[in-house]
Amino acid sequence: MSRKGRPRITIRKGLRSGVSKYIQRVVLGAGKVRWVGWEIDGVGTEIPGLILADSIAEEDILGLGVKTYVPMAFEDFLGIGAQLATKPQKLDDQDIEYRLDALRVALDRLFDRELRDVSRMAIKAMFSGVSLADPRIQARLLEWESDGAVQILGTEECYLRIVRRL
């Protein structure tokens, strides 16, 4: 364990493709600390408030008391970044591209579940405080709209309407 209460990082191999493991430090009453494990399909990036555990040795994680990882559907994950973030982040181009790719996957999954309307809050949560007016985000959304995959409505309740799979 490092001095800052985070596990030491040891490289580990052999994870299932497309599934990432995270641990979360939860402070309970009277200063008691508990660590929780999450398994999230289709993410694999840093999330404010969670520690990406894919590269942490299993012994270190067991030492924290994490014995299992609770599966979380990708669609359920969409809002967790915004809920856990303590302050807006500055995302570089690679981070934005990754999150746009993750949004594309999420939109396809929502379409497959016959859900068509996506709120501004759900999309904004993917970008950890970066404005949806960011030119990098708008360029991709406009590309998807010109391809006929989505309609940009821009309202709080329905920022995007999914027309077909991307």
Image (spheres, grey):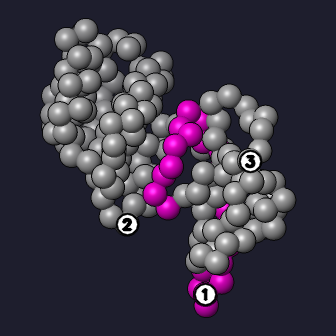
Disc on res. 11: 3
Discs 1, 3 touching: Cβ within 8 Å: no
Instruction: Mark yes or no: residue 70 visible.
Output: no
Q: Mark 3 packing: few (<14 Cα in 10 Å), some, or many (20+)?
A: few
* Residue at 68% across, 28% down: 17
Q: Is residue 90 above or below residue 115?
A: below
Q: Mark 1 packing: few (<14 Cα in 10 Å), some, or many (20+)?
A: few
The disc labelled 2 sits on which kind of residue? Thr
* Residue at 47% across, 18% down: 112
* Residue at 26% across, 24% down: 140
23 with respect to 95 (left or right): right
Mark 2 vs mark 3, CA separation in Å:
28 Å
Q: Mark 2 packing: few (<14 Cα in 10 Å), some, or many (20+)?
A: few
71 with respect to 130 (left or right): right
Image quadrant in which you'd find residue 36: bottom right
> In the rendered image, which residue does mark 2 sit on?
86
The disc labelled 3 sits on which kind of residue? Ile
> Residue 132: x and y, percent?
21, 40
Q: Is residue 60 above or below residue 45?
A: below
Q: Earlier in the sequence, mark 2 or mark 1?
A: 1
In which quadrant of the rendered image does the N terminus lie? bottom right
Discs 2, 3 touching: Cβ within 8 Å: no
> In the rendered image, which residue does mark 1 sit on?
31
Which secondary structure lies at badge 3? loop
Which secondary structure lies at badge 2? loop
Residues drawn in magenta: 28-49
Compare residues 98 and 25 and report the one nearer the observer: 98
Residue that lies at the very extreme toward the top in this rendered image: 147
